């Protein structure tokens, strides 16, 4: 399992496996009201999931085996508007592994800084989302049961909700 120091710090904070990704809001992320457009959050969350998957899964091996991870549902809540220059911290964890589907839980919080200064609302919850995925056999186009080696790997990545 490969982790950079940010991810290791995050893993030390709570039990389980998760990743932490940081990005800065740019002007092109904004809507006409001056805050991050709702559709951009899907992109931010995807960035966080890629970080998680690259750190914890052998994506090349899954591709060789004809396995694709496919989103089938998303539930997303917004809590506080992010604006230009905000540093955003995206946390991603695997919250549930069932027989045929898994749920990744993600949250976005305001980071510690904004334009090099301490952010007065650092740590504020901006958004949270649950993404439901299935593993798809790329040859048949059908969902696969989460069992065997891949099921064991996914269960090993489960992370309980932080206290």
Image (tube, rainbow, N blue to C red):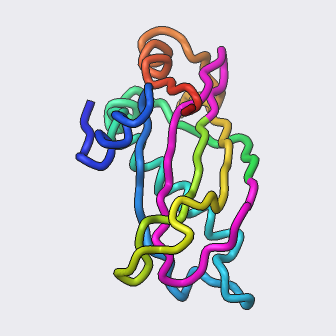
* Side (left or right) of 61 relative to 131: left
Instruction: Please identify the quarter of the rendering in which residue 71 is found.
Output: top right
Who's the residue at 57% across and 32% down the image? Answer: 163
Who's the residue at 65% across and 18% down the image? Answer: 98
* Side (left or right) of 49 relative to 72: left
Instruction: Please identify the quarter of the rendering in which residue 96 is found.
Output: top right
Q: Which residues are magenta?
A: 77-103
Residue 64 lies, in percent from the top left, at: 35, 32
Note whether residue 33 is visible: yes
Whether 30 is drawn above or below 111: the answer is below
Closer to the camera, 27 or 60?
Answer: 27
Who's the residue at 31% across and 42% down the image? Answer: 9
Closer to the camera, 128 or 117?
Answer: 117
* Side (left or right) of 162 relative to 87: right
Closer to the camera, 50 or 69?
Answer: 50
**Magenta residue check for 17:** no
Residue 139 lies, in percent from the top left, at: 54, 30
Residue 132 lies, in percent from the top left, at: 67, 37
* Side (left or right) of 91 relative to 3: right
Who's the residue at 55% across and 28% down the image? Answer: 137
Whether 76 is drawn above or below 26: the answer is above
**Magenta residue check for 93:** yes
- Quadrant of the drawing holding the N terminus: top left
Whether 60 is drawn above or below 51: the answer is above
Note whether residue 136 is visible: no
Instruction: Please identify the quarter of the rendering in which residue 103 is found.
Output: top right
Residue 44 lies, in percent from the top left, at: 54, 62
């Amino acid at each position: 399992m490969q982790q950079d120091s940010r991810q290791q710090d995050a893993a030390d904070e709570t039990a389980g496996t998760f990743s932490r990704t940081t990005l800065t809001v740019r002007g092109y992320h904004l809507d006409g009201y001056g805050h991050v457009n709702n559709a951009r959050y899907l992109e931010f969350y995807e960035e966080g999931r890629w970080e998680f998957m690259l750190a914890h899964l052998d994506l090349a091996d899954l591709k060789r085996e004809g396995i694709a991870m496919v989103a089938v549902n998303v539930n997303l809540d917004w809590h506080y508007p992010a604006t230009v220059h905000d540093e955003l911290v995206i946390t991603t964890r695997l919250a549930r592994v069932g027989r045929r589907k898994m749920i990744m839980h993600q949250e976005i919080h305001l980071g510690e800084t904004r334009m090099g200064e301490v952010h007065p609302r650092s740590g504020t919850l901006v958004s949270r989302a649950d993404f439901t995925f299935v593993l798809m056999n790329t040859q048949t186009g059908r969902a696969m049961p989460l069992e065997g080696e891949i099921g064991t790997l996914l269960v090993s990545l489960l992370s309980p909700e932080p206290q």
